[in-house]
Image: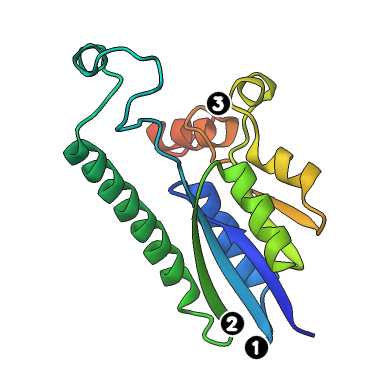
Amino acid sequence: MERKIIVAVDQGEESSYALCWSLKNILCSSSDTLILLYAKPPRNIYPSVDGTGRPRDFLLRQGYMFSQDIVATMERYGNEVAESVIRKAKKFCQDYPQIKVEIKVECGDARDVICEVAEKLNVDMVVLGSHGYGALKRAFLGSVSNHCAQNIKCPVLIVKQPKKASPTSPPAAAAAAAATSGGKQE
């Protein structure tokens, strides 16, 4: 049975964890196709007049316009980030030569890009990493995984990275106390 599975990747370690987890636990057959999807953030600046009718020098002084050189530099940086993310993701896939890997880099808001590509390619599953934001951060920043889970027609798997033990957690604190007291615990 041939399956097409999207794993959304970005610069965060959450997406790297989700990719590695998927490679170990979901993708196993030579008929599986893994689609690494990176959503390149859209540019928020525009090199042309915004339609206000204000003179060009006024817009430049107010920071509304940027020179073509700056816009080109920002575009080049965005492309370099995309290449870096994809290169890193492809390295994780090297240990799984039986899996076909395709690359997709699309420009736009990650929520929209993931939903559109999943629908357009008629994939069997979408895998996303979770940043683990609390309710307040999700309210302000929005949740890519929540949006995709609500809007994509195929199954959406949200992979949560295990929490790392903090230095003040009880097991670590007990081990540190035992180490400083010569192994004796009170």
* 106 or 102: nearer the viewer: 106
Q: Secondary structure at mark 3?
A: loop
Query: What amino acid is found at the position of numbered circle 3 in the picture?
Result: Glu
Q: Secondary structure at mark 1?
A: loop
Query: What amino acid is found at the position of numbered circle 1 in the picture?
Result: Ser
**In this view, the mark in front (1 or 3):** 1
- Picture layout, residue 148 above or below residue 173: below
Q: Secondary structure at mark 2?
A: loop
Residue at x 74% of width, y 55% of height: 157
Image quadrant in which you'd find residue 45: top left
**Quadrant of the rendering where the N terminus is positioned:** bottom right
The residue to which callout 3 is attached is 186
The residue to which callout 2 is attached is 99
Marks 1/2: CA distance? 5 Å
Instruction: Answer whether residue 162 is visible to the viewer in this image.
Output: no
Answer left or right for 135 relative to 109: right
Q: Position of residue 116 (x, y in %)?
A: 67, 53
The residue to which callout 1 is attached is 30
Q: Position of residue 2 (x, y in %)?
A: 75, 83
- Marks 1 and 3 close (CB-CB < 8 Å): no
